Amino acid sequence: MRSAAIATALLASTFSVSNVSAATPTLNVYTYDSFVSEWGPGPQLKSAFEAQCSCVLNFVAAEDGVSILNRARIEKSATEADVLLGLDLGLIQEASELGLVQTHQVDTSALKSELSWSSAEFVPFDYGHFAFIYDSRKISSPAASLDELIRSDASLIYQDPRTSTPGQGMMLWVNAAYGDQSATAWREIADNTETVTKGWWEAYSLFLEGGADYVLSYTTSPAYHVVAEGVDHYKAAAFSEGHIAQVEVAGISAYTDQAELANEFLRFLISPEAQAIIPVTNWMLPVIDGVELPEIFDNLVTPTTLGFSPAEIAANRKGWINEWRDAAAN
């Protein structure tokens, strides 16, 4: 009788645990690899969101934002993604036109006015400007413009625009600065290029190992080195013609069966709690006011903004990539 009672109790306990497990929803978020690294915002955001959502937040990493879009485009209705996190202004038009996302239900009125945000499908979670980073111990007179950098003999590392949002930012930068002379500029850049990587992390790691004089990253990258490492010799070169801005966004998959939970997650991303985490782990700027930042953020390069609208990028992206590929191969 006693063994039977124990068996019955164990069965009931197992059934109860199983029911609890089955009732706990999982939110699958496609994002990029540095976001979910141990030093990125992913782990802290996961803990904070799970504490309030009674859910499991599951990050699925790709190499970069372009890779996220490519994966979602290939998978279509077979995707496991509930949220796409890490697209940017250069990708949202295409994601929308492909029908990969749905309208969100998030109040974005608290976003910084400078973002002028009006999208009904995407919610920004951070922003910044692309920049070339250099080591001031090695370079005392950095290039003061993109043209000066291209015409110098400095070695460069940047990312592939087919797979990387920074690489795409580089492509936009060249086209904004050179227009119909972009192919010529790309051929000059090729002479200085040490390597082109698939994603940001690989490029920046190679730079830190001494692989080139400059690497394409962000104006905020020096803040990481000051706060996390206590060193201030990594600098962002300020270019006179301006810099390309990046606004990173999250959107809800058109195919999710967790739309309510996905909306809750997007609301969380722009909450004071999440916004306090992201700048000092993803090393970008917060999208709401009132976030306390380390002092170094006050001393970063504050460039004028170059760029194109999402519609202009979507209309020209394929042609610009082909132009880059043809010129870089010569």
Image: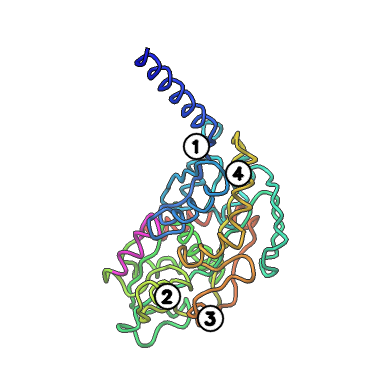
Direction from residue 207 to residue 117 in the image, left or right: right
Magenta residues, start to end? 196-208
Q: Is residue 10 left or right of residue 104?
A: left
Frontmost of labels 1 and 2 is 2
The earlier-in-sequence mark between 1 and 2 is 1
Residue that extends furthest to the top in the rendered view of this protein:
1
Residue kind at label 4, given as amino acid type: Ala
Residue, disc 3: 298
Question: On residue 258, which mark appears?
Answer: none
Name which residue type carries label 2: Pro
Q: CA distance from mark 1 to mark 4?
A: 21 Å
- Give the Cα separation between the discs numbered 3 and 1: 42 Å
Is 289 on the left-hand or right-hand side of 48?
right
Q: Could you say where residue 214 lies in the image, as x and y percent from the top left?
A: 36, 73
Residue at the (30%, 71%) spot, across then down: 212
> What's the mark number on residue 222?
2
Q: Is residue 60 magenta?
A: no
